[in-house]
Amino acid sequence: GAGVSQSPSNKVTEKGKDVELRCDPISGHTALYWYRQSLGQGLEFLIYFQGNSAPDKSGLPSDRFSAERTGGSVSTLTIQRTQQEDSAVYLCASRSRQGVETQYFGPGTRLLVL
Amino acid sequence: AQSVTQLDSQVPVFEEAPVELRCNYSSSVSVYLFWYVQYPNQGLQLLLKYLSGSTLVKGINGFEAEFNKSQTSFHLRKPSVHISDTAEYFCAVSTNAGKSTFGDGTTLTVKP
């Protein structure tokens, strides 16, 4: 595919369960970003990868959140012991070169924690 | 560290009127500036960006923005809006280190 893809598109889970969100960036893009967009809010930076390493994890809200990237491609954002306040749209973006290039966003995963 | 402030959370305008969406930023290092648009039920897409050179940049759909270094602003403008411009607009800054910071967004509502 030509764009960034994310799965699942929607996820409903019960409080306390773990969830995994997946992002497939554009082929060849070395930088990958995760953001959270809560209802009526802007984009909250979570973490970014350059290759497989994460130079900046400062946006992760708590130790329940973690992310990894393997093979310089697919990334997984994991939320453990989900809470209702985790409900949001989780957006992934990729970029071909850090700093100046445009970020290309995926459609997002809508997470609802009941 | 950098921050982005979008001064208006909501901007209602009538069709064919001009519009300006305001964005101010702060940063201790040089930044690159972007405007993204999110149409209802769609993902974010790039509207325009400033990297260097001319401070007036033109984007898609007739939008333009002017980088003002002294005022640390990057306001977005369009001389005549259409109903189809109704969307959420995000201003963002990015550094060479790779981190991006987005504003809280401005909801533009174009009324007939």
Image (spheres, coloured by chain):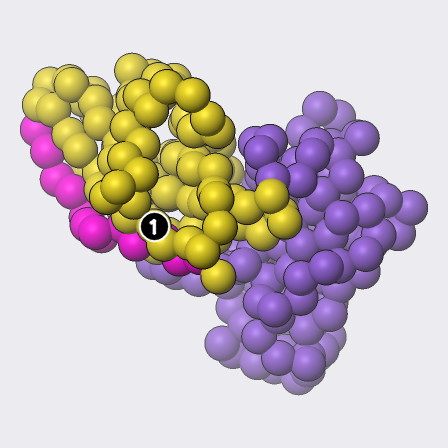
Chain colours: A purple, B yellow
Give above or below for A45 relative to B32. below
Q: Is residue A82 left or right of residue B74?
A: right
Q: In which quadrant of the rendered view does residue B71 lie? A: top left
Q: Foreground residue, A93 or A21?
A: A93
Q: Foreground residue, A87 or A28?
A: A28
Residue A54 screen position, x and y as percent: 75, 59
Q: How many marks?
A: 1
The quadrant of the rendering that contains the C terminus of chain B is top left
* Dominant secondary structure, magenta: strand
The amino acid on which the numbered mark 1 sits, given as a three-letter code, is Tyr
Give above or below for A9 relative to B89. below
Q: Foreground residue, B33 or A3?
A: B33
Residue B78 screen position, x and y as percent: 21, 22
Give above or below for A9 relative to A25. below
Q: Chain of mark 1?
A: B
Q: In which quadrant of the rendered view does residue A73 lie? A: top right
Q: Is residue A98 left or right of residue A29?
A: left
Mark 1 residue element: strand
Residue range highlighted in magenta: B2-14
Q: Foreground residue, A57 or B82?
A: A57
Residue A72 screen position, x and y as percent: 85, 44
Q: In which quadrant of the rendered view does residue B27 lie? A: bottom left
Q: Residue at x 33, y 24 (%)?
A: B55
Tell which residue pokes out farthest to the right in this image.
Answer: A71
Give the labeled residue for mark 1.
B25
Q: Residue at x 48, y 38 (%)?
A: B32
Residue B3 in magenta?
yes
Q: Residue at x 49, y 76 (%)?
A: A85
Residue B15 in magenta?
no
Residue A46 screen position, x and y as percent: 59, 62
Q: Residue at x 66, y 40 (%)?
A: A98
Q: How many neighbours does mark 1 have within 10 angstroms: few (below 14), some (14-19), or many (20 or more)?
A: many
